[in-house]
Image (cartoon, rainbow, N blue to C red):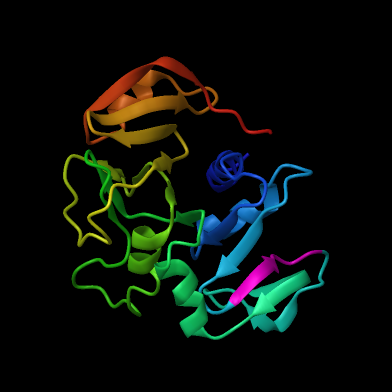
Amino acid sequence: MDEKTLIAKRVALELLDGDLVNLGIGLPTLVARYVPAGRHVFFQSENGIVGMSGPINGAENHDLTDAGGSPISALPGAASFDSAMSFGLIRGGHLDVTVLGGLQVDEEGHLANWMVPGKMVPGMGGAMDLVTGARRVIVAMQHSAKGESKIVKRCTLPLTSVRRVDLVVTDLAVLEPTDAGLVLKETAPGVTVEQVIANTGAELIVSPDLRTMPLEG
């Protein structure tokens, strides 16, 4: 199993029946593939749809896309609307969960995911609204990039929000930001605590209930 699939499978287990969920561009979009059978989750995209699905057996409609421009399918009962309505849902606190990628998360649970200074970016998109407005924020990202940990003591990249995120799922671990610091709750299959600590640029509190990351609901 590749790293992105592992992360997406673990995040999918966090989604509850009836949740209204926004998936960010990139890795988070994979989460929709792994929602446990029998669990009904409503996916929203900030470009204006509730009730979207990723491509199913080639049934995608190229006139319908997610926020990243990838074709999607609309499930029976789906609703489409303009961006004003879409961001009204987000800013109004109606999203149960948002799943976003990350460039950095620090010990205080701050997320930086929209800009690398000196590099061209199209803009912050809906990231700032999503982190501020959703009831629960889950960051889905690889633990390290180019040999450097993305879990850091303090973010050096511009913050997306000063709000503390609720959960961080990486290819090595599941971390929960708390008042006391970053709690290591789970390690990926075959990964030791020592490996997680060695690949992390922040202090970790090892949970007394530490377990191996589940991948099936």
* Residue under the image location 32 percent in, 76 percent down: 121
> Magenta stretch containing residue 77, yes or no?
no
Say left or right for 191 vs 58: left
The one nearer the camera, 103 or 75, is 75
How would you classify the magenta stretch by its main secondary structure?
A: strand
| Image quadrant containing the C terminus | top right
When the figure is inspected, residue 172 is found, relative to residue 70, above or below; the finding is above
Q: Residue at 75% x, 80% y: name it.
A: 61
The location of residue 69, given as percent across then percent down, is: 56, 78
How many marks on residues?
A: 0
Is residue 136 rendered to the left or right of residue 7? left
| Left or right: 49 in relation to 166 | right
Q: Is residue 43 visible?
A: yes
- Rendered view: 39 above or below 177: below
Whether the magenta-drawn stretch holds residue 52 is answered as yes
- Quarter of the image for residue 66 reads bottom right
Residue positioned 40% across, 69% down in the render: 91
User: In this picture, is 205 found above or below 147?
Assistant: above
Which range of residues does the magenta coloring cover? Answer: 49-56
User: In the image, residue 159 lies at what x, y percent?
Assistant: 22, 59
Q: Quadrant of residue 206?
A: top left
Rendering coords of residue 129 (x, y %) = 36, 68
Quadrant of the frame with the N terminus? top right
Image: 190 above or below 66: above
Q: Does residue 116 appear left or right of residue 166 in this picture?
A: left
Residue 70 seen in render:
no
Tell me residue 21's x, y (percent).
56, 58
